[in-house]
Amino acid sequence: MWVRSQNNKILMDCDGFQVYNRGPRVDICDMKYGHILGSYESEENAMRVLDIIQNRCCRIRLLEVSSGYKISLSETKEFVFQMPEE
């Protein structure tokens, strides 16, 4: 799934996400490289964003299955998930 970080400096194809509680902030990072994609005030807020990501992944997968082809980078503009602000 293509994801753009909160600060717009990272655009990457992520295979997995993890929530890290790092003191006063809770970060959502990609599992492969550990890049911080979004930072939130509470674990509850971070989990809400993770739920949104999960739903988006399911919709993209459903589209791929129903259309019969994998979505390519050139087709991803509307499929890039922008990490929301707090």
Image: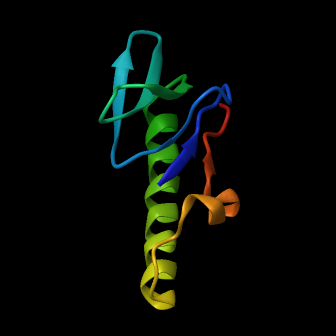
Nearer-the-camera pick, 12 or 20: 12
Query: In the displayed structure, does residue 84 sit left or right of residue 72?
Result: right
Determine whether 23 is above or below 85 in the image: above
The residue lying furthest to the left in this view is 32
Percent x, y of residue 60: 50, 70
Is 83 located above or below residue 53 in the figure?
A: above
Count of marks overlaid on the render: 0
Residue drawn at (46%, 81%) of the image: 69
Question: Along the line of sight, which residue is nearer the eye, 60 or 38?
Answer: 60
Residue displayed at 30% across by 35% down: 32
Residue drawn at point x = 34 percent, y = 49 percent: 15
Task: Report the coloring of the rendering.
Answer: rainbow
Q: In which quarter of the image is residue 85?
A: top right
Relative to 53, say whether 64 is above or below.
below
Residue at image position (52%, 70%) is: 71
Q: Where is residue 65 in the image (x, y as percent from the top left)?
A: 42, 84
| Image-based side of 84 in relation to 42, left or right | right
Residue 52, horizontal then vertical, whole percent: 52, 55
Q: Which residue lies furthest to the top in this view?
A: 23
Quick one: quadrant of the C terminus?
A: top right
Report x, y in % for residue 11: 58, 38
**In the image, is residue 34 above or below residue 32?**
above
Viewer-closest of 25 and 53: 53
- In front here: 30 or 18? 30
